[in-house]
Amino acid sequence: MGGDLLPKKADLRAPIQRRFIKGYFNDYMARLNRENIKFIGILGNDDLEIIEPDYLEMISKYENIYNIDGNKLDIEGISFIGFSKVLDTPFFRKDRIVIEQGQEMPKQLKEVVYVNKCQEPLTVDEWIEFRKQNVPYMENELEKLPKPTEGYKGIYIFHDPPYGIGLDNCKDGDKVGSKAMTQFIKNSNSYMTFHGHIHESPKISGNWYGKIGNTISIQPGQSEYREPELRYVIVDTDEDYYELKTINIEQKDLLHGFFE
């Protein structure tokens, strides 16, 4: 799972995400545990940092749930490595934000932004200055990640997409992926990378996967609230097989009560 897992209704996001974690998500993790199914994943920038302790406390109860953000999990010949941070966005919540060399700040949708786990409101001008001294660079953060274990297939779970291969296309035509990530993937010689963040990208570009060097990079896309289509990818690492799948779900039943 590559992030943006939790309900995101803007005006009630924090309390709804807490309820979702302690209710539906906890019950779902318990079901996976009973079925001996492993859950390997990270959170995304739509999943508030301020509620992350609730998420970590919940998953700590289960031996089959793995949070790999900034960490590595070696299992069945694969090294899974996760990274939840994204380049600066237009959104007023600045969760999991990094910058990179040459990146211009995107035009902001609000006159006020919230940083430091939504505790410190800043004007846009104050955010410009704050970024210069307090926000880390994508290049440096990627270099801090663990390396795949020798002899294992390396699979990176990145919330942000790379730039330039059709996985970062916004509906307004902008391409907002990370150039530093593209270079990192090219140098990594990893087996696969998985991405999210730009939910609509595959519908806009027509591409849900691409190749960087010897690495296959996959971005299945993601449904939004009230959209019935769920997109996911099945991968067989033994057969080097990957396929995009879609199913229709009734979200009014799945998330009954969370938006009332």
Image (cartoon, grey):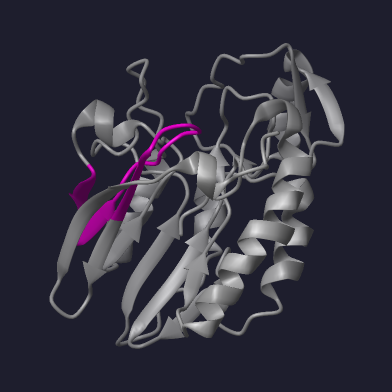
Asked if the magenta segment contains residue 210, the reply would be yes
What residue sits 26% from the left and 31% below the top? Answer: 203
Q: Is residue 71 visible?
A: no
Q: Nearer the viewer, residue 89 or 254?
A: 254
Residue 229 visible in the picture: yes
Q: Is residue 85 above or below residue 166?
A: below
Is 158 left, or right, of 11 in this rendering?
left
Query: Residue at coordinates 66% horizontally, 66% vertically from top-left?
Result: 26
Magenta segment, which residues? 208-232
In the image, is residue 51 above or below residue 119? below
Q: Quadrant of residue 58?
A: bottom right
Tell me which residue sits at (57%, 66%) in the image: 28
* Residue 80 within the magenta-colored segment of the rendering: no
- Judge whether 213 appears above or below 31 on screen: above
Residue 14 placement, left or right of 157? right
Residue 10 falls in image quadrant: top right
